[in-house]
Image (cartoon, helix red, strand yellow):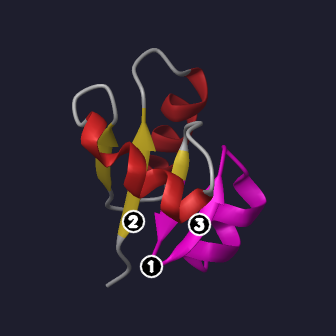
Amino acid sequence: MTRVVVYTAPNSEWCEKVKQFLKENDIRFDEVDLSKEPERIRELEQKSGQRGVPVIDVDGVIVVGFDEEKLIKALHL
């Protein structure tokens, strides 16, 4: 089973779009809200090289921002 982790922040329109896209495609995901888990910011930086959100980790394939084309490819949709 594909493991999907979405790094988010509150009030982010792009984070909401990513979550909506995943839900519409019946993709289960774990959400890491960096405002509630700031200790995971370093993890985000190591994976993506940045602090911006959303960042999506699909079994180690990192997608920065809401890039539908890259998500489709990473998720094999």
Q: Which mark is residue 59?
A: 1
Residue 60 part of the magenta-drawn span: yes
Q: Is residue 18 shown left or right of residue 32?
A: right
Q: Which one is nearer the viewer's eye here, 58 or 46?
A: 46
* Residue type at tag 1: Asp
Q: Nearer the viewer, residue 40 or 17?
A: 40
Q: Secondary structure at mark 2?
A: strand
Badge 1 vs badge 2, beta-carbon distance below 8 Å: yes
Is label 3 in a helix, a strand or a loop? strand
Q: Residues within 10 Å of mark 3 (few under 14, many from 20)?
A: some
Query: What element does badge 1 sit on?
Result: loop
Q: Position of residue 10 (x, y in %)?
A: 39, 20
Q: x, y (%) of residue 4?
A: 39, 65
- x, y percent for residue 5: 38, 59
User: Which quadrant is home to the N terminus?
Assistant: bottom left
Image quadrant of residue 54?
top right
Q: Which mark is residue 4?
A: 2
Vertical order, 25 against 66 (above or below):
below
Q: Tell me how far mark 1 sits from mark 2, CA to CA.
A: 6 Å
The residue stretch that appears in magenta: 56-77
Q: Residues within 10 Å of mark 1 (few under 14, many from 20)?
A: few
Q: Residue at x 66, y 67 (%)?
A: 72
Q: Which amino acid type is marked by label 2?
A: Val
Above or below, comparing residue 36 to residue 76 in the picture? above
What is the distance, in whole Å, between disc 2 and disc 3 at their CAs?
A: 10 Å
Q: Is residue 65 above or below residue 63?
A: above
Tell me the quarter of the picture where residue 18 sits: top right
Q: Which residue, as the protein is rendered here, is positioned at the far left?
A: 36
Residue 62 numbered tag: 3
